[in-house]
Amino acid sequence: MGLKKIKVQLATGKSSFALLDSEHGLVEPYGTYMDQLSLSGVPANTLEAKASDLKIFFEYLAAFSNAEEVAAALPNLDRNFLSTVILDFPNYLIFGNKNSAVPVAWFAATKNNRIPIATTSSNRVKSTVNGLLKDSALFHSSLQSMKAQGIVNIDVSAENLFDELLQRKELSRAERQAMMSRSVLAGVIMGGAKYSDSSLFKSRVRTGISKGTGAYVDKALTSVEAIQVLDEAKCYRDRCYWSFLLGTGARPNEGLTLLQQDVDPISSTVRLVDPATRPLEYVSLSNPENASHKGREVEEVYFIEPFRTYFFESLQKYLQHERKPFSCDHNFLFIHLKGPNKGKPQIDGDMKTQRKAFKDALRACGGETKKALHACRHFYGVYCRNFIPLGNDRFGFNENTVQLMMGHKKTESTQVYTLPPSYLLKAKLDHVNRLIEEQGISFDANKEMKLFDNRRGL
C-alpha cells in the first residue's frame, strides 16, 4: 500500500492536503482532519508540516493492513491489538528498523523501510498525532457509517479479529486488506484521547532550562548580533524588514503582510492589520493563506529603539531607491527585488532567498547561523521581558505586558522569555565586564550600565 500526500484546494479557496492510497483511493479520515485544520485558520507552513507528520502515522497504520501477514509475523499479540499498535508508534519513530526488541514497531518499520529519526523530530510528529487523537470526535459521524457497513470492532483479541476477517471468503484479498485498513483507522479515531494520554505518547522535553524559565533565550539573537546583522544587510529592503522584526517582535510572515498605508512616517507608527479583515487586498496572491495572522489584541505595534530609527531611516531609502523603480500595481510594502518575481509582493513566492540573506548576514557578523528569522522575534521577547530599562534601576516589563506587545494568546507563550534570576544577573555582569575590557577604565557600574542600555538598547 503506497500513500502519497497531495495538496488540494477547498471550495473556500483555502489549501488543504489529502492522502492517496495507490490501491484504495483517498484516505478519508486524513483528508477530513486536514480540511478541518485548514478551515480553522492554521497557517500554511504549519498545515503542511502537520500533513507530513500525519502521513508518517498513516503509513505506520497501513503496515498492518494485511491481516494474514500480521497474524503470521506477530502471533503473540495481546488481546487489545489496536492499543499495542498505537502505543508502539513512538518506538517506530525512535528506533525505526534498527531494533527488533520492539516487534510491533519493528514489523512496521521493516515493511516501510523506516529509519530512526531524531528525538526533536519525533516529538513534533507525536505532538501532531496527539492532536489527531484528541480531536477524534470530528470523525464520529464517519465511524457510525463504518459501523453500519459491518466494519469490525478493532478492540477485540487479535485472534478473533483475524478470524472474522479471513472467514469472509466472498471478499477478495484487496477487499479484505481495505477492510483491515479502514478498521485500524476507525479504531484509532474511536479510541482517541485514551492513546494520546499514554505516557508512551508524551513528547520528551529537553533537559536544562524548562519552558517558562527562559527556554527560548538561546534561540534569540544576542544584542550584538541584533545590531550587527543590520549593518551586514545587502539592501535597504532587508535592513528595513529585519529592523521591523527586531523592533516590534512581529512574526516574519506578519511583517511581509504590511501594506504601504499601514506605515505612518510622520508619527513613526506602524499597524499590523489582520489580513482577514481586508481580504480583497490579498486576493491577488498566488497563495493568500501565506498572509494569515495568529491575531493581536491591538493593531499598532510597540516599536522599541534603536530599531524604530533603523526602520524609518531604511524605509525612506528603500522606497526611493529600490521599490519606486518597479512602479508596482499593488500596495504591499516589501517586494522581490530580483529574479522572476521581481516587483511582486515578497510574501508571494519562495522565501529561501530571504532566509539565505539573513543567514549570510549572520555569518558575516560572526553570529550563530543556526538561528532563523524568527530569532528576531525571540530577541524582542527576551529584551522586553528582562532588559528594557524602566527607570529607577528596574528592567523588563511584566509577562502580561509582553504578552500584549507580542500578540500572544496565552501567558504560557510569553513565559519562555522570562529568564531565571541567576541568568539575568550573569547577563548584566557580562555587559559590565565587557565595558571594563573594552574601555580599560574604572567607573560606577550602575551609571555605566544605564549608559550602555541607552546606547545599545539593553
Image (cartoon, rainbow, N blue to C red):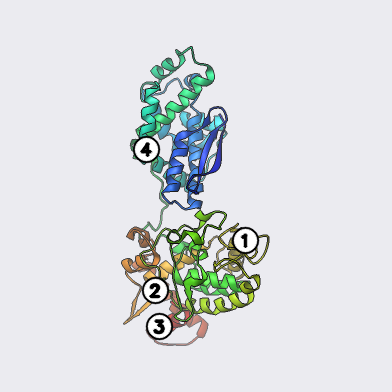
Q: Residue at x 41, y 67 (%)?
A: 381
Which residue is under mark 1? 353
Label 4 to label 1: alpha-carbon separation: 39 Å
Q: Which amino acid does label 3 sit on?
A: Lys
- Could you tell me residue 41's position as x and y percent? 43, 51
Q: Mark 3 points at which residue?
A: 450
Tell which circle, 3 or 4, labels the residue nearer the N-terminal end. 4
Q: Is residue 83 something one can see in this rendering?
A: no
- Residue bearing mark 4: 136
Q: Which mark is residue 387?
A: 2
Q: Which of marks 2 and 1 is in front?
A: 1
Find residue 380 and report its image quarter: bottom left
Residue 29 visible to an observer of this rendering = yes
Looking at this view, is 82 or 337 the one in front? 337
Mark nearer the N terminus (4 vs 2)? 4
Q: Nearer the viewer, mark 3 or mark 1?
A: 1
Cα gap from disc 3 to disc 4, whole angstroms: 55 Å
Q: What's the residue type where badge 1 is placed?
A: Thr
Q: What's the residue type where badge 2 is placed?
A: Phe
> How many C-alpha atoms fall within 10 Å of the one at disc 4: few (<14), some, or many (≥20)?
some
Structural crowding at the residue carrying mark 1, measured as other residues with C-alpha within 10 Å and reported as few (<14), some (14–19) or many (≥20): few
Apparent side of residue 374 relative to residue 161 in the rendered image (left or right): right
Q: Where is residue 440 in the image (x, y as percent from the top left)?
A: 50, 85
For the N terminus, the image quarter is top right
Q: How far apart are marks 4 and 2 (CA)?
A: 44 Å
